[in-house]
Amino acid sequence: MPPKVEKETWNDDHTAILIRGIIRHCLHHRSELYQLPGLEGVSDHGGDRINKKVQQILKKVCEIYPNVKAGVVEEEMKLLSNVRSKGKGGNEGGSSPKENGGGGGSVNDTPKKRKVKDESDDE
């Protein structure tokens, strides 16, 4: 049996850690928020309006708690973009095919078939 952990009293540091975790989780899974019913009318520009509103709400949450740093949302956005640029985490954490020089090719990366003009047609 593991040793008994002595219980601590909750303090502002615990709150700051929890809020950072909530922000990280919310930002990492924000693509799921774009699919919520009722947001169809504001989901233009690839969900940019929703993304900005999510960030705005998270910043307001940070303002409520005195021990939470002001730039937590920006820090987490930067960390998330660094993870994506390194291609970790599959589709959610990876960069887009266009950024990788792909996009528009076939799924299994075989070259596209091109029509070859028959030389006998020229005569």
Image (tube, rainbow, N blue to C red):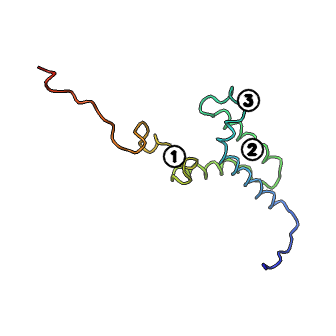
Image quadrant holding the C terminus, namely top left
Identify the element where label 2 is drawn. Answer: helix
The reply to whether discs 1 and 3 touch (Cβ–Cβ < 8 Å) is no
Residue 97 position, x and y percent, is: 47, 42
Say which quarter of the image contains residue 56.
Answer: top right
Which residue is under mark 3? Answer: 38
Q: Which residue is located at x 40 percent, y 39 percent?
A: 106
Q: Is residue 24 above or below residue 110?
A: below
> In front here: 3 or 75?
3
Judge from the rendering whether residue 118 lies leftward or rightward of residue 109; answer left or right.
Answer: left
> In front here: 117 or 19?
117
Which residue is under mark 2? Answer: 59
Say whether disc 1 or disc 2 marks the residue closer to the N-terminus: 2
Say which quarter of the image contains residue 47.
Answer: top right
Identify the element where label 3 is drawn. Answer: loop
Closer to viewer: mark 1 or mark 3: 3
User: How many other residues sit within 10 Å of disc 1, few (<14), some (14-19) or many (≥20)?
Assistant: some
Q: Which mark is residue 95?
A: 1
What's the amino acid at mark 3?
A: Gly
Residue 53 position, x and y percent, is: 71, 36
Q: Which residue is located at x 68 percent, y 28 percent?
A: 40
Identify the element where label 1 is drawn. Answer: loop
Q: Which residue is located at x 41 percent, y 42 percent?
A: 101
The reply to whether discs 2 and 3 touch (Cβ–Cβ < 8 Å) is no
Say whether disc 2 or disc 3 marks the residue closer to the N-terminus: 3
